[in-house]
Image: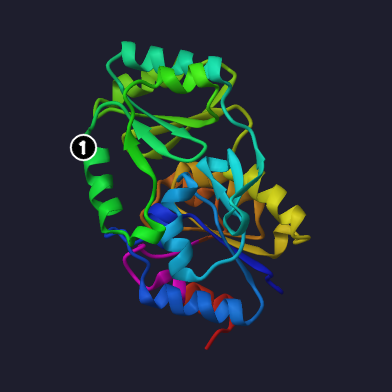
Amino acid sequence: MSYQAIAFDLDGTLLSSQGTILESSKKAIKQAQEKGLKVYIVTGRHHTAVRPYYAELGLDTPVVCCNGTYLYDFQNDEVLSSNPLGNALAEKLIHSAKAEGIHVAVYTRDAMTYEVLNAHFTKFLKWVASCPENVRPNVYQAENFQTFIDNGTTIWKVLISDPNLEKMQKFVETLPLEVSAEWSWVDRVDITKAGNSKGACLAELLKREQIDPENVIAFGDNFNDISMLKLVGMGIAMGESELEVQQSAKKVIGSNNEDSIAQTLNELLQLN
């Protein structure tokens, strides 16, 4: 197989449990780039939370963000395509989640926002503060999400989280058909406009780049990666992913804390 591109999920995949890219992975990615392969990040993250890793890898390709809600070009600070939540729909989601006591975060055009600090954002803010200022993600506490609604601010997704998984599951089951709910972590669900997925947005990106999905390698670890793993010619699931994710892949490898990505790329691309 003559591969042309590699697509990476970040959290739980390219990133170790410490939130870092392993040196072995960086070396393999650089070697793949030198062989002419394109490298894409396909993530549930907001683009500003991708920026530190994008810079670390020296990428120049568009990024699939917020589970395929938008395709972002860092070079020109341009959204190449998008399907955001409508403001009326976002308002409904925010109010209904709050009514159930579920934590809400709102991802707007340029920032990740929260009204109330929770454990997830406390940890996240520590990482943000550790990033160099020139690539630091944009996250802040909003006084009231309603201001975004009233001002017509573009809203990419509503992120809900709660340690009570039964409550979360019940809430997800009541969501309107106009939205798509993706479990991005064990206690977090990303809610975006229906039809958005990593696979759909990656397919659009590959069409723009004139690359056949069959000639693409993709690495993922969670339910929101399934559409991407099924799209490409070589979908690869991380070893600690759920069974459903592994069954959606053509290959299952080791942990994100091991050199499994580098080893797999070496095998598939004959890098060494």
Relative to the observer, which residue lies in front, 112 or 213?
112
Which residue: 55% across, 23% down?
179
> SS at mark 1?
helix
Within-10-Å neighbours for mark 1: few <14, some 14–19, many 20+? few
- Residue 17 percent coordinates (x, y): 29, 58
| Residue 238 visible | no
| Residue 98 visible | yes
Badge count: 1
Which residue range is magenta in the image? 252-262
Looking at the image, residue 68 sits to the left or right of residue 81; the answer is left
Task: Kindly indicate the quadrant of the structure image that contains residue 98.
Answer: top left
Which residue: 76% across, 54% down?
208
- Residue 138 percent coordinates (x, y): 39, 45
Q: Which residue is mark 1?
A: 119
In this view, the residue farthest toward the bottom is 272
Q: Is residue 106 above or below residue 39?
A: above
- Residue 267 percent coordinates (x, y): 54, 79
Q: Is residue 239 above or below residue 146?
A: below
Relative to the observer, which residue lies in front, 46 or 253?
46
Which residue: 40% across, 46% down?
242
Task: Kindly indicate the quadrant of the structure image that contains residue 12.
Answer: bottom left
Which residue: 28% across, 27% down?
162
Q: Is residue 148 above or below residue 190?
A: above
Residue type marked 1: Ala
Quarter in which the N terminus is drawn: bottom right
**For the stretch drawn in magenta, what is the main secondary structure?**
loop
Q: Is residue 2 above or below residue 130?
A: below
- Residue 92 percent coordinates (x, y): 47, 13
Looking at the image, residue 217 sits to the left or right of residue 142; the answer is right
In the image, residue 57 lies in the stretch drawn in magenta: no
